[in-house]
Amino acid sequence: METIQKNKLFCLLFVLCTMYISCNDKVEFSQYKTLKDSSWKASKKISFNFNITDTLSPKNLFINIRNNSAYEFSNLYLITVLKFPDSTKVVDTLQYKMADEKGAYLGSGFSEIKENKLFYKERKVFPKSGSYAVEIFQAMRKNGEIEPLNNLKGIQDVGFSIEKIE
């Protein structure tokens, strides 16, 4: 009887592991950088380097942000630089909503840390194979001020991921 229960438990674990692995097959690249003291300096660029071999299939690109309760804003402004193998650069200024109208943080997570998976580029087809890089800067300012916020508190990790489109 005990052997049957162990076999059922093993089968259940096997099925769960298989489901987990198959659900993550679409992730081609995923990396995080942790910020010291959960503080992002305006001058600090977060860089991710990745290789592209498939120049036919579209991919979704994401910026992943983990923030904690020290984050004081309802939005997040970022500047990104996508560098191509031929030295071409594409610069974007992006704005993301980080909290709802009541001030509750968006994202997933049960503790004070919330993870936000933010669309960077949808259905991106890379024109050339080779080595690419993405640089991400925070561009937050207080209302009425021109200079960027020197230290953006409450951002613990910044990540970048690429997923195949099924």
Image (tube, rainbow, N blue to C red):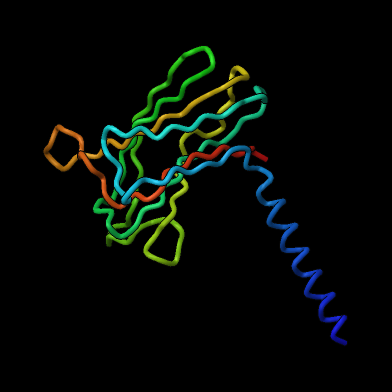
Residue farthest bottom in this picture: 1
Q: Residue 128 location in percent, x, y?
A: 60, 17
Q: Residue 84 location in percent, x, y?
A: 51, 19
Which residue is rendered at x = 59% and y = 25% of the image?
125
In the picture, the quarter occupied by the C terminus is top right
Q: Is residue 21 above or below residue 79?
A: below
Looking at the image, residue 25 sits to the left or right of residue 82; the answer is right
Image quarter of residue 146:
top left
Looking at the image, residue 145 sits to the left or right of residue 58; the answer is left
Q: Residue 75 location in percent, x, y?
A: 30, 47
Which residue is rendered at x = 37% and y = 50% of the image?
156
Residue farthest front in this picture: 36
Q: Is residue 44 above or below residue 153?
A: above
In the picture, the quarter occupied by the N terminus is bottom right
Looking at the image, residue 59 sits to the left or right of residue 17; the answer is left
Which residue is rendered at x = 43% and y = 18% of the image?
89
Q: Residue 33 location in percent, x, y?
A: 44, 43
Q: Is residue 95 above or below residue 87?
A: below
Numbered-mark total: 0
Which residue is rendered at x = 24% and y = 53% of the image?
72
Residue farthest left in this picture: 144
